[in-house]
Amino acid sequence: MAGIVAAAVLRAAVGAPDTAASMPAGVVFALALLVVAIAAGWRPGRPRVAAAGLGVVGGGVLAGAWLLSHGSPGVQVAPLNAGLALWTPIVALVAIAEEVVLRGVLFDAVRSGFGDGAALLVTALLFAVMHVPLYGIGSLPLDLAVGLLLGGLRIVSGGVLAPAVAHVIADLAGGWLL
Amino acid sequence: MTARRGWGVILVSVIALTLVWRFLPAGSPPIYDGQCIANPYETLGGSPAPRAATMTYPKAAAFPPAEVYTAETPPQAQILIEAGTFDSSTAVTVSITPVAPPSVRPPSGTIEGNVYRITAVNAAGAQLDPLSRANPVYIILRALASSPAPTIELFNGTSWTPLATLNSGCGNTFEGTSTRMGDFAAVRPGSGGGPPPPSGGGGIPIAAIIGGLALLLIIVVVVLFSLDRRRNAAR
């Protein structure tokens, strides 16, 4: 938990004054999270097709929830440019790192002591709170609901791959779809 | 059994997502997370110059849901319009134009970035405002910094009015809700001592929405797991 807070502080320091827009801060944050995860003993498991498929469905639900509620007349795919080409792998890296730490290391740690329910709540709450400095208090209920969905995917699939795939798809949809 | 609980959580969270998107004001960040792409702010009089934007909507039975935004990344000015907001008995042209700041300065602080004139005009050239207070427009402007949080303010030709403002996320963007068209700017609080800006949006206190939804989510998940535990204990 301290490692996650430290990574978030590091991100804010590197990315100030506009942390949410800072790509170097995103890379630093993701690498710091992965260092925390590896230091805590996390190692990638063997990927399972079923878990990846579940993640794709979860990502579709997350992107679809926004699309269905989107007030604009139409949704378009963003034109490819250098910015988007650089943004895409960084966003994917940040999403994967967050899932490895939250739904991987932290989820397992809390579950071993307090069970699935506590692990789900702690990781979902932390996921929501850690995004408030970036996106404002208005993002709290949205990220809380997303954190629960990702936690549900973690419980169903038994691993971090499904929530990681879903998280990456949801985040990329935010940039690729206008 | 664990997987069944997980499916229950997924079902609850999908319902919660639907509710959250339903109650969040239009223009809330369309992202769950992730870096945003934000190019340097383009200031009026600088190079490159800030862009204008115009969209014309043909005569229709009801004005369609619409979104007009300038071409920067992210857009420096946007307007989100819900269905039926304007009288659409003739074609309606919605325009966003960066303009020089008026000589009257906002009393509550300092203008950050450009002032944008956002108008809706019918085929006869008459200026339109939203038909009713129930159909506000959502003005999203990019500021230069997120802290202290600026307020979107409306200048009606004589005075500035602070609008209910929310952080929209990427690139220091902020959203204000307005029932009038006019000149809009992000105003950083500072010297001036004007009235405090209203908080929240859409008439319902945003804190109440957030608190209520968060509490609801937590209660549902706790109940879900406690029911499952009781069921297991009974076996």
Image (tube, helix red, strand yellow):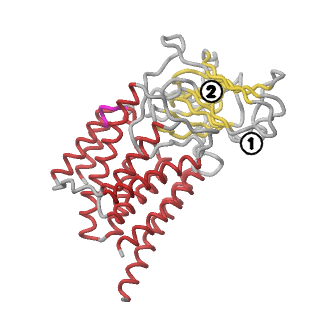
Q: Residue A28 occupies which quadrant of the picture?
A: top left
Q: Position of residue B119 (x, y in %)?
A: 70, 25
- x 54%, y 14%: residue: B44
Q: Tell me the residue at 21%/56% (across/down).
A: A45
Residue A175, position in %: x, y? 45, 37
In the image, taking residue A68 as reference, residue A111 lies left or right, namely: left
Magenta span: A22-26
Does dot 1 land on a helix, a strand or a loop? loop
Give the alpha-carbon distance from disc 2 to disc 1, as whole Å.
18 Å
Host chain of mark 1: B
The amino acid on which the numbered mark 1 sits, given as a three-letter code, is Arg
Quadrant (top left, top right, bottom left, bottom right) of the N terminus of chain A: bottom left
On the same chain, marks 2 and 1? The answer is yes
Name the magenta segment's main secondary structure: helix
Q: Residue at x 36, y 63 (%)?
A: A120
Residue A54 magenta:
no
Q: Which mark is residue B184?
A: 2
The image's mark for residue A5 is none
Relative vertical location of residue B136 with respect to residue A148 in this rendering, above or below: above
Q: State the mark number for residue B133.
A: 1
Q: Earlier in the sequence, mark 2 or mark 1?
A: 1
Q: Quarter of the image holding residue B201?
A: top right
* Above-or-below relation of B10 to A175: below
